[in-house]
Image (cartoon, rainbow, N blue to C red):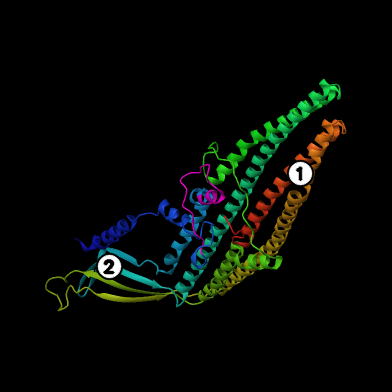
Amino acid sequence: MNKAIAAPVLLLAGAVLAGCAGTPGHEAYRRFAGDPVCIPGPPGEKGRAAAPQLPADLTEESGLNDYLAYAALHNADLESAFSAWKAALERIPQVRALPDPRFTYRNYVEAVETRVGPQRNSYEISQTFPWLGKLDLRGDVAAEEAKAARCRLDAARLKLFYQIRKVYAEYYYLWRSIKIAEDNIELLKQLESVARTRYTVGAAGHSDVIRAQVEQGKLADRLRTLEKTRAPMVARLNAALNRPTTAPLPWPRAVLGTAEDFTDETLLAWAAEANPEVQAADREIAALEHGVDLARKDYFPDVTLGVNYIDTGPARAGMRPADSGKDPVIAMMSVNIPIWWDKLAAGVHEAQWRKLGAISRKTAILNNLSADVELALFGFQDAGRKIGLYRDTLIPKAEEALKATQTAYSGGRAGFQDYLDAQRILLDFQLSYERSLADRAQRLGELEMLVGKPLTKEP
C-alpha cells in the first residue's frame, strides 16, 4: 500500500471498529431496579433490604410494596435519572484518558531538492501530555459528579415512592369513604323503615319519612361523586407506575405499617446524613474543590512530543552521495505558553465562586430540609393523635349515642332530628378517622423521603 494513504486508512479502520461497540440497553436498568437497595422491604441480612419479587403486573393481592417495586421497574422519570447517572460514570474514563494522538501528512507539491534527494512526503505523529496531575483532577471532578448523579437518582426514587404512597393513601381513603357512605345509606334505610312504622301507627309525622329519604338522597349523591373520583385517582396512580391510565387497579386493603420510634433530633440528624439532596450537594462541592485545583493547573504548560518522518527520493544520477535517498526522522517537542495571566486568574476565581455558590446551596437545602421535617413530623404526630382519639373515644361514644337515640326514637322518647344528628356525627367521626389514617401514611412517606431511609417496620 502506498505510504501516503496507509496511515489514514488504518486510522479510519480503528474508528469504524470503535463505532461497532454495543450500546447499553434496558436490561441494565432492570438489574438496577431489582437490586434490594432500590426497593424498600423488610430488613434482610446485614442490614440490606430484602427485595420483593418484581411483579409483572398488579393484582387483587398486590400491596403497597408491590406498587413500589413495580414503579421502580417501570417509571420513566426514574429510568431517565438512572441513564443520567450511567452517562456520568462514562465520563470518568474519557476525561482521564490522554488526548487523541495527532497524525499529520504533508505532500510537497513541488519536491524539495536536498543533497540526498528530493523530499516528497512528510508523516508526523504527535501526542500531547497534560501537565502532571491534570488528568487525575479531571477524573476526580467527573467521579464526584457521577456520585452526585447517583444521589439525584436516589432522590428521584424517594420522591417517586412518596408520590405513590401519597396517592395510594388517598386511594385507600376513597375506598373507605365509599364503604362508610354505603353503610350509612343502609342505616338511613333502617331509619326510614322505623319512621314509616311510627307514621303508620300515628306516632310520627310523614315529614320524618320524607327527611329520611332526603338524607338518603344526599348520601347517595355523595356516594356517586366518590365512585366517579376513582377513575382520575387510578389514572394518577397509573401515571406514576407507567401503566395505561385506564388500567384497572384493585382497592387497597391497608395503608400503613408500624412506624419506627424516632424523635425530632433523630430525624434531623438522619436527614442531614442520609438525604440524597444533601449528599448530592456534598458531592458537587467536592467536585468544585477539585475544579479549583484543576484551574490552578492551567498555569502550567502541556507538553507535546512527536516524530516526523520525511519520504526522500534518490539523488540525481551522477551526483549521488553515500546517503542518497535516506529518509530523515525528526524528534519534536512543543509546549503551550500560558502567558495570559488575567485569563488564568479569572478561571481560578470562577471555580472558587462556583464552589462558594455550591456551599450556599447546601446551606439552603439543609435549612429547607429542617423546616420540612418539622412540618411533616407535626402532621404525622397530629394524625396519630387523632387516630387514637377517634378510634378509642369518639367513634365508640358516637356509636353508643346512635344506638341509644335509635332506641329512644323507636319508643317515642326522642325526636327524628336527634336521630339524624347522631347519625351525622358518627359519619363525620368515621370519615375523620379514615382521613387521619391516610394523613399519617402520607406524612410518614414524606418523612422517609426527607430523611432518606425507611421508617416503617413492615412494608
Number of numbered markers: 2
Of badges 2 and 1, the one in the foreground is 1
The residue at which mark 1 appears reads as 429
Query: Observer-nearest residue: 43 or 147?
Result: 43
Q: Label 2 neighbourhood size at 10 Å, few (<14), some (14-19), many (20+)?
A: some
As drawn, is 134 to the left or to the right of 158?
A: left
Query: Observer-nearest residue: 410 or 367?
Result: 410
**Spatial distance from mark 2 to mark 1, Cα to Cα?**
93 Å
> Overall secondary structure of the magenta stretch?
loop
* Image point (78%, 50%), residue name: 393
Q: Amino acid at mark 2?
A: Ser
For residue 252, above or below residue 206: below
- Residue 28 percent coordinates (x, y): 42, 55
Q: Secondary structure at mark 2?
A: strand
* Image point (71%, 65%), residue name: 264
Q: Considering the image in quadrants, where does the N terminus appear?
A: bottom left
- Residue 340 percent coordinates (x, y): 54, 73
- Residue 21 percent coordinates (x, y): 34, 56
Q: Label 1 neighbourhood size at 10 Å, few (<14), some (14-19), many (20+)?
A: some
- Label 2 vs 1, first from the N-terminus: 2
Query: Observer-nearest residue: 73 or 23?
Result: 73
> Which stretch appears magenta?
48-69
- Residue 436 percent coordinates (x, y): 71, 49
* Image point (48%, 44%), residue name: 57
Say whether residue 164 is magenta.
no
As drawn, is 439 to the left or to the right of 284?
A: right
The residue at which mark 2 appears reads as 122
Label at residue 163: none
Q: Quadrant of residue 151?
A: bottom right
